[in-house]
């Protein structure tokens, strides 16, 4: 029996059917013993060197900096991630940033992933990120993701953002990991939508400008922006 509990929210789960809608991504599969190396923050040794070598080969598929995650979780709780917005250049740095993340270590301890995911680093413009709340395969609410302040450029084009998001969900509804799910997306400078990740419906996923999960999701609420 496979030791790994399948997680429909992991990139490795949904990428095969939605690769054309997201960043090109490479995967490095880990053994169960490799996860113990992460949990115990092991930085040296032949087993670590073997993983770092595989990460390096995967990085060679992309030019420039890369973005590293542990399938269902990125090391966003590390100082390096905050300072560099997630960009890593070397395979060794990629391994070390995973070890520095409590989120990644906890996920490894609980055997919640088996892949390291590598994709090209992209300096995202945060106001172009949105969270989509999809209920029974239909988009019901769309929230501004970064809640630091209002952005006039979002408000001026709110009907456009909503229409494009509705079109996306209608096109990929049959490919969703679950029919009721939360999806984070990013609009490129050319107004194309890239999928960032999927999240579990309900807490602990943050409802953002939905305010609460305790609303009638049969209704369509449209786009919510800070004013």
Image (spheres, rainbow, N blue to C red):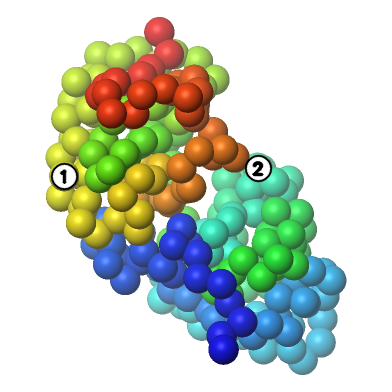
Cα separation, mark 2 vs mark 1, equals: 34 Å
Give the residue displayed 70% in from the left and 46% down from the top. 77
Dot label at residue 74: none
Residue under pointer 2: 82
Give the residue displayed 35% in from the left and 36% down from the top. 132
Whichever of labels 2 and 1 marks the residue nearer the N terminus, that label is: 2
Give the residue displayed 28% in from the left and 62% down from the top. 18
Whether residue 116 is visible? yes
Residue at the outermost top position:
227
Work out whether residue 212 or residue 226 is closer to the camera in this orientation and state it.
212
Residue 95, given in percent of the width and then of the height, sits at: 68, 70
Mark 1 burial class by Cα count in 10 Å: few <14, some 14-19, many 20+: few
Dot label at residue 170: 1
Q: Is mark 1 on a helix, strand or loop?
A: helix
Q: In this view, does 71 lie above or below 57?
A: above
- Quarter assignment of residue 74: bottom right
* Side of 50 relative to 117 (left or right): right
Residue 24, given in percent of the width and then of the height, sits at: 35, 65
Whether residue 93 is visible? no
Give the residue displayed 53% in from the left and 79% down from the top. 28
Residue 154, given in percent of the width and then of the height, sits at: 32, 20
Quadrant (top left, top right, bottom left, bottom right) of the C terminus: top left
Mark 2 burial class by Cα count in 10 Å: few <14, some 14-19, many 20+: few
Residue 96, given in percent of the width and then of the height, sits at: 73, 66
Quadrant (top left, top right, bottom left, bottom right) of the N terminus: bottom right
Work out whether residue 6 or residue 76 is closer to the camera in this orientation and state it.
6
Q: In this view, does 133 lie above or below 68?
A: above
**Tally of numbered tags:** 2
Q: In this view, does 210 lie above or below 165?
A: above
* Side of 45 relative to 175 (left or right): right
Q: Is residue 101 above or below residue 54?
A: above
């Amino acid at each position: 029996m496979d030791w790994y509990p399948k997680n429909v929210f992991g990139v490795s789960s949904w990428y095969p059917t939605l690769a054309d809608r997201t960043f090109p991504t490479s995967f490095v599969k880990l053994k169960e013993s490799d996860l113990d190396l992460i949990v115990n923050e092991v930085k040296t040794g032949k087993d670590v060197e073997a993983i770092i070598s595989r990460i390096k080969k995967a990085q060679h598929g992309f030019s420039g900096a890369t973005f590293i995650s542990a399938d269902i979780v990125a090391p966003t709780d590390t100082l390096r991630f905050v300072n560099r917005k997630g960009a890593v250049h070397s395979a060794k740095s990629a391994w070390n940033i995973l070890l520095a993340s409590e989120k990644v270590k906890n996920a490894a301890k609980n055997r919640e992933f088996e892949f390291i995911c590598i994709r090209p680093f992209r300096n995202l413009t945060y106001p172009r990120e949105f969270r989509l709340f999809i209920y029974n395969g239909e988009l019901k609410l769309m929230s501004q993701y970064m809640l630091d302040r209002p952005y006039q450029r979002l408000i001026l084009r709110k009907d456009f953002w909503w229409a494009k998001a509705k079109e996306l969900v209608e096109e990929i509804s049959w490919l969703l990991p679950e029919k009721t799910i939360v999806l984070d997306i990013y609009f490129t400078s050319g107004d194309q939508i890239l999928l960032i990740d999927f999240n579990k419906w309900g807490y602990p996923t943050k409802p953002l400008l939905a305010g609460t999960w305790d609303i009638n999701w049969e209704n369509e609420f449209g786009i919510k922006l800070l004013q």
